[in-house]
Amino acid sequence: MKIINFLGLSFLKGALGHWWHQRLTAICIIPLSLWFMASLVGHLRSDHETVVTWISSPFVTMLMVLLICGIFYHAKLGVQVVIEDYIHTRGFKLVLLTALNTGALAGALAGVLSIFSITFGIL
């Protein structure tokens, strides 16, 4: 939090910061999703080796990792708002938020490790 205050970005704390993070991740996810869908359409008739070679390029790997992390973080932020707004039992809310954070982290990690395993030829 001290870094946020040091940079003059104190508006990124609390509910307003949460709102901004959701908007920024949405703005980042839109072009990445369009790129990904267009790339998939472009590779519809490609064989496995061609797609693996495509994913293995550093630029594509970076974009895929950004897309995966952005989607999981954006989803986590959205579900967190629902839990915080509609679950009123403190203990149950804590359990759900912990499960949400763990699930989002595990999903993002699984996606990134999958991309890295293709990129670095672990498969």
Image (cartoon, grey):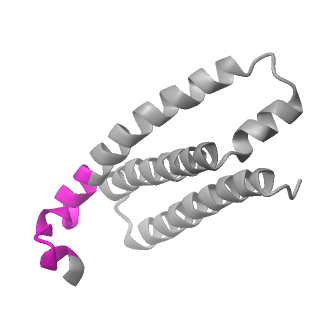
The location of residue 7, given as percent across then percent down, is 15, 73
How far across and down, in percent of the image, does residue 29 sit?
Answer: 43, 39
At which x and y percent is residue 67? 52, 44
Q: Is residue 52 left or right of residue 3?
A: right
Residue 1 visible in the current orientation: no
Residue at (75% x, 18% y) in the render: 44
Q: Is residue 75 above or below residue 3?
A: above
**Quarter that holds the N terminus:** bottom left
Find residue 50 and report its image quarter: top right
Residue 50 visible in the shown view: yes
Question: Which residue is at a point 56% across and 48% down the rendered structure image?
Answer: 68
Image point (71%, 51%), residue name: 115
- Foreground residue, 9 or 59? 59
Q: Nearer the viewer, residue 90 or 5?
A: 5
State the residue at coordinates (30%, 46%): 24
Question: In x, y percent, where is residue 25?
Answer: 37, 46
Above or below 38: residue 56:
below
Looking at the picture, does residue 3 appear above or below residue 83?
Answer: below
Please, what is the dominant secondary structure of the magenta stretch? helix
Tell me the magenta residue range: 4-20
In the image, residue 115 lies in the stretch drawn in magenta: no
Displayed quadrant of residue 64: top right
Number of marks present in the image shown = 0
Residue closer to the observer: 109 or 36: 36
